[in-house]
Amino acid sequence: MKVAFVGLGSMGLPIAKNLVAAGHALTVYNRTEARAEPLVALGAKAAASPAAAAQRVDALVTMVSDDAALEAVLGGDEGALAALPRGAVHAAMSTISPALARRLAVEHQAAGVGYVAAPVFGRPDAAAAKKLWTVVAGRGADIERCRPLFDAVGQGVLVVGEEPAQANVVKIAGNFLLAAAIEALGEAFALVRKHGIAPQRFLEIVNGHVLRSPIYENYGKIIAESRWEPAGFTLANGLKDTRLALRTAEEVSVPMPLASLIHDHYVSAVARGWEGIDWAALARVCAADAGL
Amino acid sequence: MKVAFVGLGSMGLPIAKNLVAAGHALTVYNRTEARAEPLVALGAKAAASPAAAAQRVDALVTMVSDDAALEAVLGGDEGALAALPRGAVHAAMSTISPALARRLAVEHQAAGVGYVAAPVFGRPDAAAAKKLWTVVAGRGADIERCRPLFDAVGQGVLVVGEEPAQANVVKIAGNFLLAAAIEALGEAFALVRKHGIAPQRFLEIVNGHVLRSPIYENYGKIIAESRWEPAGFTLANGLKDTRLALRTAEEVSVPMPLASLIHDHYVSAVARGWEGIDWAALARVCAADAGL
Amino acid sequence: MKVAFVGLGSMGLPIAKNLVAAGHALTVYNRTEARAEPLVALGAKAAASPAAAAQRVDALVTMVSDDAALEAVLGGDEGALAALPRGAVHAAMSTISPALARRLAVEHQAAGVGYVAAPVFGRPDAAAAKKLWTVVAGRGADIERCRPLFDAVGQGVLVVGEEPAQANVVKIAGNFLLAAAIEALGEAFALVRKHGIAPQRFLEIVNGHVLRSPIYENYGKIIAESRWEPAGFTLANGLKDTRLALRTAEEVSVPMPLASLIHDHYVSAVARGWEGIDWAALARVCAADAGL
Amino acid sequence: MKVAFVGLGSMGLPIAKNLVAAGHALTVYNRTEARAEPLVALGAKAAASPAAAAQRVDALVTMVSDDAALEAVLGGDEGALAALPRGAVHAAMSTISPALARRLAVEHQAAGVGYVAAPVFGRPDAAAAKKLWTVVAGRGADIERCRPLFDAVGQGVLVVGEEPAQANVVKIAGNFLLAAAIEALGEAFALVRKHGIAPQRFLEIVNGHVLRSPIYENYGKIIAESRWEPAGFTLANGLKDTRLALRTAEEVSVPMPLASLIHDHYVSAVARGWEGIDWAALARVCAADAGL
């Protein structure tokens, strides 16, 4: 397929590489131009603006940092939406608010362009290994058109429903579960450490035989080893996603006190200067508050 | 082995049955006598007091509800500790405070009796199926003497160290991780439900492909189906264990705000009359607070 | 002075009446036109748009509900800012975000118009009785020009500094202290009630002799009597201001766990359908969670 | 009156001095004997045990640190209760649990001794200045017998009811309101400071004109000046009283999330080594968590 790809961050870059590797013809755009070089080396074209990238493609794929970034990519004269041909489809892979997804669905329909919300679960190493899970929502025909793209970048497509925003809700609620697991590990590790028990041994026992989750395994090890860098997903992004969870919840009047607690710990982590390290450093706040 | 077994509740009864089935000679005691009948039918003897049960045995196994119950079983003239022969060993399987475990370790040593802390992970159905995991701590020789008993009731023995209280810390911290997972699921489900997404589908996506934990699977289903009864582990017990986590943490000056949040939700659940249903009903508080 | 007044809600209306009573020449605008009638009856003129109201005045006073409302009043072709004469001054009395205040300060300066942030403490009855306290920040000369207006509507002017946003920070932090007092009363009342003590008697003892605050007195009585209506300040506004506190705090990386707790209780109150009653009903959530 | 006085800590000592100054004949006991010297210099007698102090007195006054200390004073062979003459009365001024108060009321009645719960509001300087407020509950006749004592040490007696435990509930709920005010000030100060506003100015505005409470004034100044020493009431005692609030609430199934938050902050303060400074240092945790 002819594909415009916008957003070559730590997730976007490996995804775009996999699309090229699968034989798709990519035109890429990134705010920081140099990030496009490795893709150009693989045969992709680089465009000077989102609009330039979006001309005459079958599909647009975006993987940018937040609501504001996606609006900037799509809107205005240099924006991609106006440049997309009627009949094209846009797969929006960023973790954005359901509210923006709802608005974009309407705007795309008015422009005769399909809109599929397609956020992914997985960190940069999973993206590189084609091990992402893509959570998608949108009209069936739009999803089918994007399927070759999703197949090229992950191990599976998980369809939520016809309303794009719902994929974003699932992604946001899912990320909240991950952050909650990190917070819980952070508090539990502080408890066992101050009772003289190695967190690694605690993890072996409780995750090894009871929880049995690769997520607890992965984050448990990062925390036990204080391996905060390099960040697979930055703490600043963790704060952003927690804020998103709280706003998505407030929109439908759902109190989420655990999300609030995580939010407050992330804010404290930023106050301590930790915004650039891995979001697992939520547990570092738990340790510091315990005098560790 | 000749074994005294005290505490035939929903966990103790299936464990005692498995000990009898493995060929151990049990003398059992339970405050409510009638609970002993099924075991007597299997060949166990019933005793009129903990002290009567403990005479001339190789080992004492206790599985009672809390600190106070264990102290009542062991102490005083009718108590089991004074009645145990020198050289016997006591495997204490209850979830009790590390503080009590420390005191008991000293008292048992003074009485010439071994003391092994041996709390278990698993609900009554796992106990019946010999699928428990036994977390143990104590002197190596004492643990070895108990091993035939542990082998008869579970799928494995996980040794923490030589200090009995540490097994209790691990059990308490582990139960906290489970309650934290339930709280997180409760909040996430409220969020997705009010956005029109079936919690079952959310669970399939996020646990099926990301968390991949049998614990999230099990509790997620209970919550999604509001299957609060019969209780595998009562909400009142969940509150008790959360209180235990907070006190065990306070003892070493570790703040656990997530444990506090869970505690407050459990207290609210009790105020609503839910103390007898499954502790997964923590999620019912989340739903009710969201107007569901 | 010739004054344009925009926003005739439960606070704006009595303030505008006091300005008229003090001899100022008011041109008023309100989205719902009928709200202007009592002022027209007192001699004010009604305008068809914020821009129409703002022409040829010495000062603009705004008292609208939130950031979006104030932006709508000021911006665009029908907006008040473009219509204000150079040299006029704008006293913005709404509780808005410091971020908006900062932007407005710049825009007003560019338009040659003074900008004074002037949020008030006090409920509608205090506004009617000229008992408001006006917290102001801005350039000294701008404040002085507004002083006759402030003197006409309250019992005093409290100057924070030269940067308008700071008055908004003080107002937001102040409102947080009030909400915190309500939450604390709500929890304390639930505690004493379930121990058989009348909250009124508790209030007499603790506020009568220890705290000695008219705020605790006022809200304590409202809560003790469940007098949620009529709302002096709605719960929906309480939620809005708590959200404002959290965002204002996040902007400078300050965790406010108590604000988060209040936020979550307000969200739960809205989920229960209580958004239109007095914000003191935060305490009603505390009572409900305790099974009262 | 002939009075036995037990507990000469920072509150007990000035109270005992005022009783001597009012002409009462005191026999005092304190675990650390040297604390009795200033009273002996004023004419009091020192006793070697609580029991020795309690012989042949009209009243016993106790002001000790917690439940365990009061039980140690009263119980056993060296205990004061067995030594008190029938017809004497015991005014228990410590902040203890309602559960203990209930048990003591029964035990005193069995011993023919009156029991009046009489916790006080006020810090050591207020005790020295006879400015305490005494919250009392018990049988009317018992209260009347103690009244000359209460009149000698405070500015007023506030009667809650006939059941002693209720005075303890009021004291515990009252202390919770004070800690809540400190937490709120701590968060508000962190917010305004990071926005460049002096906390003193914020306090002048909001407490000076809105809250108008001497408690906010006093603690606000302590916090604004980081004047954590000397401690009027130690942080360790603040933690103890918050724990008491949570247990008193749990007893009647009242969730108190704000008390939990305060508890967790106090635990963190102890982890940082701050247990000996003033309990207003709760606000220091807020500041530290904000990177201040």
Image: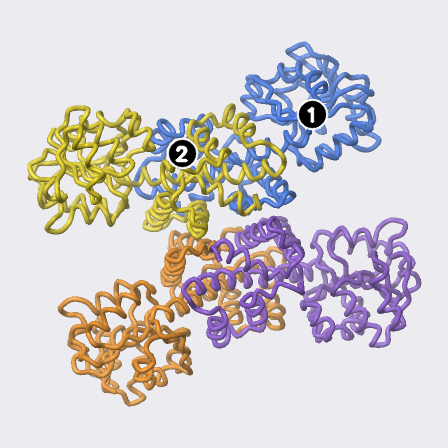
Chain colours: A purple, B orange, C blue, D yellow
Q: Which callout, 1 or 2, points at the residue further toward the start of the chain?
A: 1
- Which residue is nearer to you in this view: A4 or A283? A283
Front label number (1 vs 2): 1
State the mark number for residue D76.
Answer: none
Q: At x 56% / y 43%, what residue is drawn? A: D292
Q: Position of residue A3 (x, y in %)?
A: 86, 67
Q: CA distance from mark 1 to mark 2?
A: 40 Å
Say whether residue A44 is left or right of residue B63: right
- Would residue C267 be seen by someone viewing this image from the given angle? no
- Disc 2 marks which amino acid? Ala
Q: Position of residue C210 (x, y in %)?
A: 37, 29
The 10 Å Cα crowd at callout 1, few under 14, some 14 to 19, many 20 or more, is many
Residue C139 image offset from top left, x and y in percent:
71, 23
* Residue with the mark numbered 2: C224
Around disc 2, counting alpha carbons within 10 Å, would you say few (fewer than 14), some (14 to 19), or many (20 or more)?
A: some
Relative placement, left or right, of C189 versus D167 is right
Residue that carries the numbered disc 1 in the rendered image: C138
Q: Residue at point 77% right, 26% down?
A: C50
The residue tagged with tag 1: helix, strand or loop?
loop
In the image as oriented, which residue stretches furthest toward the top? C23
Amino acid type at image mark 1: Gly
Q: Residue at x 34, y 65 (%)?
A: B98
Query: In the displayed structure, does residue C138 sit left or right of residue B97?
Result: right
Question: Could you tell me residue D188's position as x and y percent?
Answer: 54, 37
Residue C67: quarter of image: top right
Q: Secondary structure at mark 2?
A: helix
Nearest the camera: A169 or D269? Answer: D269
